[in-house]
Image (cartoon, grey):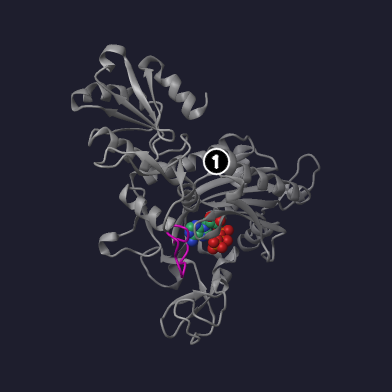
Amino acid sequence: MDIQVKGDLMEKLVSLCKRRGFVFQSSEIYGGFNGFWDYGPYGIALKKVVEQLWWNEMVEKRNNVVGLDSSIICHPKVWKASGHVDRFADIMCDCKDCKTRHRVDQMPDPSVCTNCGSKNLTEPREFNLMMKTYVGPVFDEDHKAYLRAESCQPIFLDFNLIRIATRQQLPFGIAQVGKAFRNEITPRMFTFRSREFTQMEMEFFCSEEDAMQWYEFWRMERYNFYKNCLGFADEEIQFAPHDKLAHYAKAAVDVEYKFPFGWGELEGIHHRSQWDLSRHQEFSDEDMTYLDQATGKRFTPTVVETSVGLDRMILAILCHAYREDKAPTQKEGMDEDIRVVLGFPARIAPVQVAVLPLSKKLNEKAAELQDKLRHFYRTEFDVTGNIGKRYRRQDEIGTPYCVTVDFDTENDNAVTVRERDTMEQERVSIDNLKAYLDNKIYGW
Ligand code: ATP
């Protein structure tokens, strides 16, 4: 039975992520580099699966959404046209006493430092979030370029190339997954606000008349993704409509997740009107309009966007999965102790099946079995420590099924399958093992 998690959940999660190899602070041996994170072996496994799940839902399952993988650095004019060079800024102020820098929109009282309580603050000023670099041999203003602050701009640049290459007619979408960079002033809450992060974005091009309907459609599609694909409960997610819209936007809503530190934005769904294409048309002098074959009308398409940070999604998945319960233990003098479990849905667990030989003498037989299973599932071979310890380790990395090869396996051609959540064990014939696991993991 699950028990109430005692203490700070975020602290526990950060420590588990480090201990078990999900997420590490970047450049830790140099004291760390604030706002940058490395995904360890289980973290990258989880990240790849979740990215693929999104890609499958947004692109592969649909005939009217296609993909793109663009460069991270584009022509500097792109960011002038998009408004990022002039306007992508947070209003900041510094505490003159403790030197803490604050985002003014996040201060409960913008005249008091939230760190030390001082009222001795600098005047609020704009701070541009674009990360800069230089391209070419000369490091001067003419060679300045930007790391993209959002992954969607190249989608607008390539809109016509993609439309022509794929013979797509409106309405259709273009999706991209890739890194984005923002010089966030206050990176915080683990990976929630980082300076380098991955976005998964889809821009859907349609006529102005249909745009509100598509906006509603994508709003619900994305909500259902969180419920059906990730298993989030209704109490964990909510829509938060924007109070203030960007000047070009017609409608915008965030999907928020209930993180241990409060509700936080996971994803934005935006009706962006014709802003992006018309701005690029203006700055590039290229025709970005679309000719509707059926009506003979030419117009600039309207864009509905869905935009989510993969790192925030992973953080929400980890928060959702973390739990503690009481479980039997082999520790001396104790019948049970607290078990830490990452209860990932089996479909997305970094390791779906762990193969555990009961004794070293059974390594060869177990390795043979793993070789068969690894064609179908993400597997791990674990031989170190007693079986109880190995189960606990697999619980902590969220492995839903442990398959133990024991001395009876030779005789009955069967293995013991132990389920993470119930801790129940079942004897399953090796001949039926794939059917058994397919059913458990994928419901086939
Ligand atoms: P916030 O208000 O939290 O700064 P935003 O409204 O600027 O976010 P968008 O520009 O709409 O965010 O970006 C889309 C998504 O990209 C966000 O919903 C979030 O999941 C992710 N994202 C944005 N900034 C960061 C960041 N600094 N670190 C991690 N993910 C981010």
Picture coordinates of residue 306, whole percent (x, y):
61, 50
Asked if residue 358 lies left or right of residue 353, the reply is: left
Q: Secondary structure beneath disc 1? A: loop
Picture coordinates of residue 15, whole percent (x, y):
35, 54
Residue for badge 1: 231
The residue nearer to you, when weighing 334 against 312, is 334
Q: In this view, does 243 lie above or below 3?
A: below
Asked if residue 249 lies left or right of residue 122, the reply is: right
The residue nearer to you, when weighing 54 against 337, is 337
Quarter holding residue 334: top left
Picture coordinates of residue 326, whole percent (x, y):
39, 42
Q: Is residue 60 above or below residue 178?
A: above
Q: Which residue lies furthest to the top in this view?
A: 411
Instruction: Identify the residue shown where x is 48% and y is 37%.
Output: 345
Quarter holding residue 60: top right
Picture coordinates of residue 63, whole percent (x, y):
63, 34
Q: What stretch is highlighted in magenta?
A: 182-194
